Amino acid sequence: MAPRILILRLACSITASTCSRAPDRASADLRLVDDGEVVCCWRYASIDEAVRGLLCSAGGARAIQAAGEQAVRDVLLRSLAQFEDPQTAVVTLANTFRWVAACR
């Protein structure tokens, strides 16, 4: 039977206390198989679609709870303008995600 491989998405909270502590691989009984980065482009047909999509995300929902929908919408409109293609109006966000594969 082939070993089971676990794919773990690594995310880190913005807080320094969370980021400063490295996971203890030995206590998890995992052996690193591979790791890397992958670029995922999020493309939206327009800035309005980008705002709607981001407002529907977990981060968008938390931002709305903290600041209100209109405030978040206004910030997104201003922030996303730099990612809008002036000829097509397509908004492209290139996101880099780190990944790791490990097995027991």
Image (cartoon, rainbow, N blue to C red):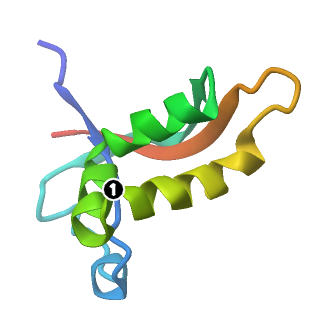
Residue at left offset 86%, top offset 32%: 86
Within 10 Å of disc 1 (Cα), the crowding (few <14, some 14-19, many 20+) is some
Describe residue 17's horizontal placement relative to residue 92 as left or right.
left
Compared to residue 65, the image places residue 41 above or below, namely: above
Q: Is 12 in front, or is 81?
A: 81
Name the quarter where the C terminus is drawn.
Answer: top left
Nearest to the observer: residue 32 or residue 7: 7
Label 1 belongs to which residue? 69
Quarter residue 14 falls in: bottom left
The residue that appears at 64% across and 39% down in the rendered structure is 94
Q: Is residue 36 above or below residue 65?
A: above
Foreground pick, 55 / 93? 55
Please indicate whether residue 38 sits to the left or right of residue 22 in the image. right
Determine the residue located farthest toward the bottom in the rendered image. Answer: 17
Q: Quadrant of residue 24?
A: bottom left
The percent coordinates of residue 96 (x first, y second) are: 57, 45
Residue 19 in the image, given as x and y percentages of width and height: 36, 77
* Between 35 and 104, the one nearer to me in the picture: 35
Q: Position of residue 43 (x, y in %)?
A: 60, 26
The quarter holding residue 42 reads top right
Task: Locate residue 74, reporting x and y percent.
Answer: 52, 58
The residue drawn where x is 42% and y is 35% is 52
Give the amino acid at mark 1: Glu
Q: Quadrant of the N terminus?
A: top left
Q: Residue furthest front?
A: 70
Q: Residue at x 59, y 50 (%)?
A: 77
Find numbered disc 1 in the image and state the secondary structure of the residue it sits on: helix
